[in-house]
Amino acid sequence: MVEVDQVIRAIAARMGAAGRLTGSGTDFSGRRWFRGKADKSSIKVAAGFQSVQSIHPPLYSLAASARPSGQRRPAAAAPDPPDPETLPCVAVVDLGVPNDHGRLARYCRGRFFSPNALATHIGSHGSLVASRVVYGDSSSHAGFAAGTPRCRFYDARLACLPSSSSEPEIDDKSVLQALQGVRGAAPDVRVFNLSIGDYRALSGHTGVAGEEKRLLMQELDNFIFANDVVVAVAAGNSVRGVAPRFPYPQNWQDPDWALGTWACGFNTLVCGSFVSQLGANGLGTQVGWPSPFTRVGPGICGAPIPSFAAEGGNADASWNFSPGLGVWGYSDSGFVEDHCGTSMAVPILAREAAVCLQVLQEYCEPGSRPFGVTVRALLALAARRQEAHPSVKSLADRTLGLGKAICPPIGRPEGGSATIIWQGIIPGKSETLRIQLPVPSAWLSAARAPVLRVIVCYDPPVNSAARGTWACRKLRAVLYPGVDQPPIRRPRGGHPTFPLIDRRYELARYKELGGVLGDLWVLELSYEDVAPTPPGMVGFDPSQRVAFAAHLFDDAEAPIDPQFALQALPSASSMNRLASSKVSSLSPVLVRVRS
């Protein structure tokens, strides 16, 4: 720290009156940065210091363009609200919500003001996003106004005065500051909503700016790894009124429609948008089709991103937003308004993640908690996407991911299938976890087309220098049909390093061996290092959180329900708690010293 201070003082002295430093900070990886004003001569002076890694203009993101489609109606009387203290919470990292908002103030958990942001809210974007976190989605104005709140929100304000854009901007350096600030002030808040984006694809940022954008993604992914949180990010929108080079739904071929900076990471939950209701002159002519404006994957290193989708609206033939094409939300003045954008879709995903965390907490021992990757695995398993029409299948595969995430009723399992959830920690790269996975032999023998679907999730550290892998770790998951049996060959496909593994095992070949194999199969989990972690990364830990959600079902026309056979297992009564996990204390501890 002393040497850093000496370098900064030397740079400031050499820059002279032509330049001045106005702000500073530290990235999550430990890299120090400084903001200031400078002319060409002072930049040349600063560039002469060997310790200066890069000099670039300020980097900004925009609120992910929740555009009005024209409808605005006064809010009707709302039903009696639930007690906000009982609701899960989502941190809305955005442009702010009015302190006295008529429909949202009651559900505000707290506020954080970024050091470089305005203290007040700007526009309606933050209110629209927060209202969808609280009230969800509805197909009508009346339905939204009468909705029952399921979440509350933490208002993290990041708005800056516009530099060159006519829209409010968000200083990219302030995003991680806000996440760290909320974590310090309210450690119980573990879900963050980022309805921010970039009109330019990640590949469109070149040179120093491109490297800095990749470092921003690295910081966010590593923050998730170190803090065990869930960060939902909007896939981003196209420029309003600008048509792609290829007509919808072939616009996935346009490189300018690719994902922007924040939406390309591995550990985030990236949310695309689909059409939820039809309107006149809409490009999406069927419910469930991808929203024309939503940006297109894959993510960095060809990863299968976006992973989820939610209701976000439609666009008309001129690639603008018309009345009746959007989804509902509350403006800053309390009116129910019709808006479009992926920024309106991602709050639906964030609220489901928060609800899922609260539900899973009931199955944790005191002092323990569910992992963020446990929530990701369960939401991925329960996500549903409508069967895409052949004409939009290529676009849907690149924008909708697994579909809309819905927290399943864990305490009231539906008949016809069985779900098993597990979480744990791999202590190090030389360690292997072996988990007993119940597959009842009685059901296996009786089922006509038994299937086991397993989704394994983890949150590895990442390194922007690892161009081919992005992740620093690669998980290995091997399924054995018994303790002394050879492993089952894993299905082909899948990304080699993306931290969501989705496998479907057809078990028909094991039907006759059901009685021989027994009722407990084995899932073996381990990881290997495929890239070094960033130098000086804060919070590095050789242990790795991992979780899986498994689904047993019979894919025949007359399916056999596995639930009865599963509940009849002797070990079933003990399968009612998630594995204990260590919880780091975020509160200061006073240590008294005897004098």
Image (cartoon, rainbow, N blue to C red):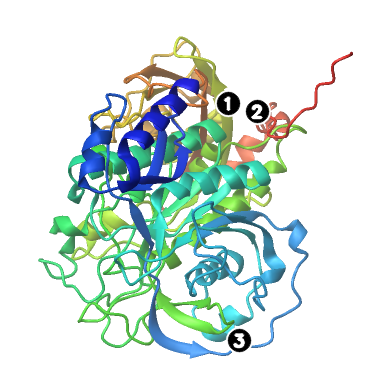
- Left or right: residue 516 versus residue 84 is left
Sooner in the amino-acid sequence: mark 1 or mark 2: 1
Label 1: element kind: strand
Q: CA distance from mark 1 to mark 2?
A: 6 Å
Residue type highlighted by circle 1? Gly
- Disc 2 designates what residue? 579
Q: Looking at the figure, which quarter contains the C terminus? A: top right
For label 1, the residue is 424
Contact? badges 3 and 1 (CB < 8 Å):
no
Q: Which mark is residue 317?
A: none
| Callout 2: SS | loop
Report the side of 465 relative to 357 (left or right).
left
Which badge, 2 or 3, comes first in the chain's sequence?
3
Disc 2 vs disc 3: which is toward the camera?
A: 3
Reading the image, the residue beneath label 3 is 75
Dot 3: element: loop
Do callouts 1 and 2 mark residues in contact (Cβ within 8 Å)? yes
